[in-house]
Amino acid sequence: MENKDKHTPGPWTLRPDCWVSANGDDIITFATAGNKTRHYYHGSGETLANARLCSAAPELLQAVRRAIPIIAENCPDNNHEPTYSPEAEVLTLLHKALDKAEGK
């Protein structure tokens, strides 16, 4: 299956020095000067797609938080194990993304 995403494939990790890395390569850093945050993007043609993905993060986080209880309510199994239903698999992915976003 071909990857149709234009951003750098994940997983992305946030290092303690505020660099975001993907597959061992640094792709973005966030730096704060006074009350302004500066974003420095590094890389090739994926740079703009990475920036767009980062800029969508607040809305994606809001969508994840709203989706979890809705999907959980409609999950056919009580254990929420990904081997039991597609809903449980999606819940597992959403919880993993939420934990990552919240630094857990």
Image (cartoon, rainbow, N blue to C red):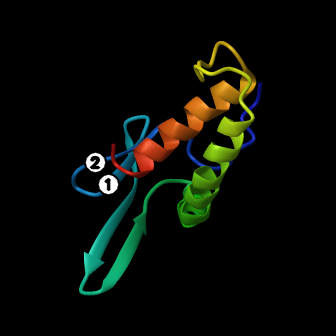
User: In the visual, does 3 lie left or right of 25?
Assistant: right
Neighbor class of circle 1 (other Cα within 10 Å; few <14, some 14-19, many 20+) is some
The relative height of residue 95 versus residue 84 in the rendered view (above or below) is: below
Q: To which residue does mark 2 refer? A: 15
Count of labels in the image: 2
Residue at 62% from the left image edge and 19% from the top image edge: 82
- Where disc 2 sits, the SS reads loop
Residue 29 or residue 80, whichever sits in front: 80
- What is the residue that sits farthest to the top in this orientation? 83
Residue type at tag 1: Trp
Q: Position of residue 71 (x, y in %)?
A: 70, 39
Q: CA separation, marks 1 and 2?
A: 5 Å
Residue at 54% from the left image edge and 53% from the top image edge: 44
Q: Position of residue 47 (x, y in %)?
A: 55, 58
Residue 45 appearing in the image? no
Which mark is on residue 6? none
Residue 99 or residue 51, whichever sits in front: 99
User: In the visual, does 6 lie left or right of 103?
Assistant: right
- Quarter of the image with the N terminus is top right
- What is the residue that sits farthest to the bottom in this orientation? 35
- Quarter of the image with the C terminus is top left
User: In the visual, does 18 lie left or right of 51?
Assistant: left
Residue 76 or residue 102, whichever sits in front: 76
Residue 61 found in image quarter: bottom right
Residue type at tag 2: Arg
Residue at 76% from the left image edge and 30% from the top image edge: 2
Neighbor class of circle 2 (other Cα within 10 Å; few <14, some 14-19, many 20+) is few
The relative height of residue 99 versus residue 56 in the rendered view (above or below) is: above
- Where disc 1 sits, the SS reads strand
Q: Position of residue 37 (x, y in %)?
A: 35, 78
Answer whether labels 1 and 2 touch (C-beta < 8 Å): yes
Q: To which residue does mark 1 refer? A: 19
